[in-house]
Amino acid sequence: MSVGKITSSQQDMVYVKVRPETGVELETRTGGTAAWDETTTSFGQAFTAEHYFGRIKIVVHDAGGKNLVARLYDSPAKGVKYVETIFKEVDQEQVLHWIFDPMAPGSYYWELEIWSSNDPTFRLKTYDGSTFSGAYEDGSVLSGKSFMSKIVYCEDTEVERQVAMTGDTVDSGTTTVKSGSPLGQINTGTVVGNISREGDELNNGGTILNGSWFVEVDD
């Protein structure tokens, strides 16, 4: 989940607006049997989100260690491109966690293809017989199936969260944040309560691994 814009400060405390994930997901399937499909062009899935969302999970069957590029559009016609992300060295049986600034409710289309390789072949997991529909290959409808993906919803209303400060507790008090988040380095938020960035140190010797995930901490 990406952080919103800095909105206010209170003495030495900085606040940002965020949309925490709700734990509700839209799975792009209605029935069907798990399978996989192969392409040398592109695969895509159309869907309609009922809430804001800032993450999409896509199941890759095999990309042979090649790079995949993911793009989010307004529709299969690809009139407007909202997001483009490259996933490096994607192999077998991997779930792509595609994180971006939250998008408003509405109709969208995600698409994947191999990025810069002499062999553009890759495989995605599908649901054969799914009535969700919306699956595409190279711009053409794939009838009777949908791709294995989940749209991860977040809050429709933004909330303000503090930037993590040195001494903030983590894991119910078992350790504390050792280094803070300088204002100029705030990129993405990870914490519901206090927001820290990727790489911030913990006093037990650990670090915050991913600056785009929300986790529980004590205020």
Image (cartoon, helix red, strand yellow):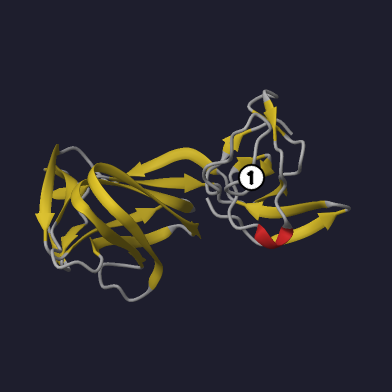
Q: Give the x, y percent position of residue 30.
A: 22, 41
* Residue farthest front in this picture: 205
Q: Residue 95, how many percent across, how many down?
A: 31, 43
Q: Residue at x 23, y 47 (%)?
A: 91
Q: The residue under label 1 is which amino acid type?
A: Asp
Q: Which residue is depicted at the point 13% across and 63% down?
A: 119
Toward the viewer: 199 or 196? 199
Task: Determine whether 167 is above or below 54 in the image.
Answer: above
In this view, 219 is above or below 76: above
Q: Is residue 110 visible?
A: no
In this rendering, would 175 be left or right of 166? left
Residue that numbered label 1 is attached to: 200
Residue at the (13%, 45%) spot, across then down: 36
Q: Is residue 171 above or below residue 7?
A: above
Q: Tell me where residue 212 appears, x and y as whole percent.
A: 53, 49
Would you say 162 lies left or right of 143 here? Answer: right
Looking at the image, the residue that sits furthest to the bottom is: 79
Say few, some or many: other residues with alpha carbon within 10 Å of mark 1 (under 14 / 14 to 19 / 20 or more): some
Tell me: 169 left or right of 36.
right
Across the whole image, how many numbered discs are drawn on residues? Answer: 1
- Taking the view exactly as shown, the residue that stands out farthest to the right is 11
